[in-house]
Each structure stands twice: as C-alpha cells, then as structure tokens.
Amino acid sequence: MELIKKYQHLLLNYIENNRFTQEPRLLYEPVDYILSNGGKRLRPILVLMACDLFQPPIEKAFPAAYAVEIFHNFTLLHDDIMDESLVRRGVPSVPAKFGNHTAILSGDVMLVYAYEYLSKLPASILPEVMKTFNQFAREVCEGQAFDMDFETSDHVEISDYLKMIELKTAVLIAGALKIGGIIGEAKAKDLLNLYEFGRNIGIAFQLQDDILDTFGDPEKFGKRIGGDIIQNKKTYLILKALELANADQKEILKHWYDQEIVDDEEAKIEAVRSIFESVEVRKEAEGLQNDFVDKAYAHLKAIEVEEDQKAALYAFAGMLVQREV
C-alpha cells in the first residue's frame, strides 16, 4: 500500500495545481466538484505506474494520467444522469446538486479537457496515445450501451455479460496501463502484456464488485447491500444462479426479477440471496474471478523488466480484487 500512496500523493498534487476554478462557474464548478470528491484514482495511478516501470521520470505522464481521470469522471457524471443517481461517493451527484442540464454541459467540457491534457504529450508519441485513448473511450460507450440493452433483454448469456464488463470497466484500466507504457517507451510486446494484464484484472475487479454488492459487509462496502438485486441487474451472480438452479428456484428468481418495483425490497434481497447461497453462486463467481487474476499475473510476469520493479503493480492488483469496499 505504501508503494501506491507514493503515486497517489504525486497525482493529487498535480490535480490540485490544475483545478477547474475558471469562469463561467456554472460550467466549471461541477467539474471541480466531481474531480475533488475523492474516489480511488485507480486509473490515473496506473498510467504513472506503467510509465515508472520502464522509463521514468513519471512527471512526464502527469498530463495523460489527468486526462484519464477526467475522462473516467466524465463517464461517471453521464452515468449518474442516465441512472438518475442521487449520490456519488457519499455526496450528492452532479445531476442532483446542479441539475441535469448543467451536468450534461459540464460533462461535455470534461471530454474536451481530457483531449487538451493529452495534447501536452510529446508529438512523437501522441498518435499512439490518442489511438489507445480513442479505442477505450469508444469501447466504454459500447459497454454502457450493452448494459442498458441488457435491462430490457429477456436473454443474456454469461459470455455477453463478461464482454460487457470488459468494455465498460476493464478496457479503461487496460488502456491506462498501455498509455503509461507508451510514455515510458516500452516495447510492443511489453505494451501488449501490460494491456492484457489490465484487461484481465479489470474483469476480476468488476466480478469482485458484483460479489460485494450482494455478499459484502454494508459497513465496509459503504453502500446498501443488494442494490443490483433491487435494480434487476443481470450480473454474473444472477446469470450463473439461473444456470445452476432447479425448476422451483428458477421460478422464484424469475418472479422477483420480473418485478420493476416491489413493496418489500428487503424480502426480495433475502429471497434472491438465499437461492444464491443454496446454489453456491458466490463460490462460482470467486472461481471465475481467480481465473482472470491468474491470467492477469501471467501477463504481468511476462513483462520484460525485473520482478522487483513490478511490486507496485502486484500490490495494486491485489488491492483491486481483495478489497471489501
């Protein structure tokens, strides 16, 4: 954890020195608000770590790291508009605090600024960085579209879900690492292994999130347990449970998931979780998660730098998939 804190400290200093405090405040106050509201800063830190793995100093990666952080928060802001979310990171979301119209406009300018910070990179690497950034930016949008489509789809396969979380979550982690590697002048083979490490650990990260949403400790998780069940989200847990359940259990699950609104949400959570436990779906999810972690570590091991130089990335990966929040 101390290895990671070093990068966090340097990144936070850069963010503090590049706050959005200009006029008009109607436009920029929401940007400054969401970027100042904490969060783990996982993705921009990966840019710095990957650069440091090859050719430091990491200061040359700060603009790209900030671009990734701005883009990530831009997607969260628009997610909150689409989901009508009132809370983000324990405080009112941007749409709840400033209104949807302002949130849309502020989100738009965040995307512009993400590209502006990328443009600060040396011209020699900018095309490759831009290609990587545009790829994951497009894929994140595709992942969100699949997620929305799943809400009304009667048939979603586990393979469909894994592809969706790869696009919506994992490619941004993978792309952040690759951009850091490009800035650090890594070889093509190492860039590929960096990307695949990030992609696999990103899928494992989202599976952990699914597990915590249903089985986590509410005091540690920081939000209500069972939110995915209440929202009828087609996560790995429900898809695998339907595959493993007997006829009666399937009928109960379909009964609860066919209802958009229920009078007793706790009863729904308890009934669904009881079947999850009966068919041992958590064990299945953790087994699949471990498969992706093993793949991620294999790619990290294949990167051609000394093993002790990878300590921060190993620690980071462990933190992602063993977290309780």
Image: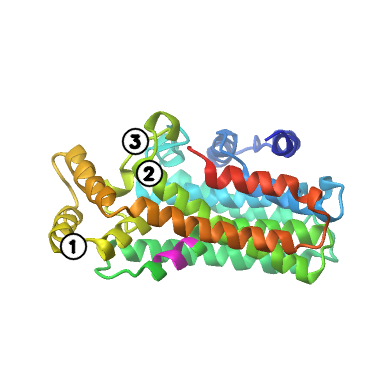
Q: Can residue 264 be seen in this snapshot?
A: yes
Q: CA distance from mark 3 to mark 2?
A: 8 Å
Comparing marks 1 and 2, which lies closer to the viewer? 1
User: Mark 3 packing: few (<14 Cα in 10 Å), some, or many (20+)?
Assistant: few
Whether 13 is drawn above or below 214: the answer is: above
* Among the two numbered marks 3 and 1 on one chain, the one whose residue lies closer to the N terminus: 3
Amino acid on which the number 1 mark rests in the picture: Asn
Give SS at disc 2: helix
Residue at the disc numbered 1: 246
**Residue 104 position in % (x across, y down):** 47, 50
User: Mark 2 packing: few (<14 Cα in 10 Å), some, or many (20+)?
Assistant: many
Give SS at disc 1: loop
Q: Can residue 66 be seen in this snapshot?
A: no
Residue at the disc numbered 2: 213
Amino acid on which the number 3 mark rests in the picture: Arg
16 with respect to 262 (left or right): right
* Among the two numbered marks 1 and 2 on one chain, the one whose residue lies closer to the N terminus: 2
Which numbered dot is residue 224? 3
* Among the two numbered marks 3 and 2 on one chain, the one whose residue lies closer to the N terminus: 2
Q: Give the residues in magenta.
A: 161-165
